[in-house]
Amino acid sequence: MSILKKLFGSKDKKERQEFCSAVVAAAGSSSRMGGEDKLFAEVGGMPVLARALLELESAESISEIIVVTREESMDKVKRLCFEYSIDKLSAVIKGGDTRLRSVYKGTLAADKAAQFIAIHDGARPFLTQELIRETLEAAKKYSAALPALPLTDTIKRVEKDFAVATADRSSMMAAQTPQIFRAEMIKAALCSACEREEPVTDDAAALELLGAACAVVPGDRLNIKITTEDDLILAEAIAAYRDGKDGLLCE
């Protein structure tokens, strides 16, 4: 019996709808990391992916965790989950040839009882319980939700290495994860995007292609995505701050 079914076994129908599955996108190539797999790079003495998984593990509203990764990393992910006691792990599956296809495969592996699916970048190690809770509450109300931050930099349109126009950033925001959706809604949106081979860069974009919109909740500036080696410098500072705040560091 899966962990999710054990959880659902003692819940009535109304309570079951409070639970959601988490799909962790961890199948990227880390091409901008100088050959290092960013998911297993250590930040504050702990792998990036482990930090993300531990936060999902601690979230009361997350019932199961599915990790989608590259075939050559599957055993490594399983060992990491065992080492860090990720008890909600229900599956480690092989990703597709794009992020879109990888995430779609992850949603199909989610327990059929899940009413919501949270999709999170494995390379975002600093999500918080508050961010998970607020995004899920918005998804319950509006069916789809994501955290986002207002842009602070001036945005330029560049052609042939020259800035030719300045974009109006007043209505633009930078999206983060976790993005949380009603399960059947996001499965249908991802399926449609896959069939049309749309070049979407996040999961909400698949929903937008069907004419739907996601509610936006305030993001967290420390919820960074590790993309380049330079990001690890900032990540070390965030880890020191977060771990010290949580009492994980020794005096």
Image (spheres, rainbow, N blue to C red):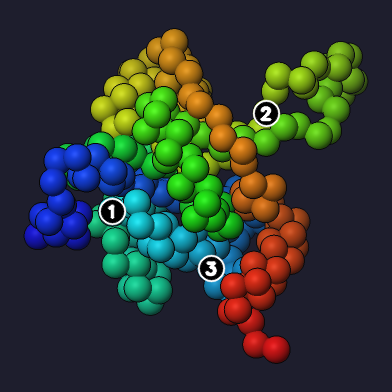
> Residue 96, percent across and down?
36, 39
Residue 47 numbered mark, or none: 3
Amino acid type at circle 3 is Pro
Question: Which residue: 62% across, 41% down?
Answer: 219
Depth order, front residue of 79/147: 147
Residue 51 numbered mark, or none: none
Of the residues under marks 1 and 2, which one precedes in the sequence?
Answer: 1
Residue 173 numbered mark, or none: 2
Q: Contact, CB < 8 Å: mark 1 with mark 2?
A: no
Quadrant hosting residue 240: bottom right
**Label 1 belongs to which residue?**
63
Depth order, front residue of 204/199: 204
Q: Is mark 2 on a helix, strand or loop?
A: strand
Nearer to us: label 3 or label 1: 1
Of the residues under marks 3 and 2, which one precedes in the sequence?
Answer: 3
Q: Look at the image and tell me whether residue 212 can be seen.
A: yes
Per the model, the C-alpha gap separating discs 3 and 2 is 29 Å
Q: What element carries label 3?
A: strand
> Residue 160, percent across and down?
84, 19
Amino acid type at circle 2 is Met
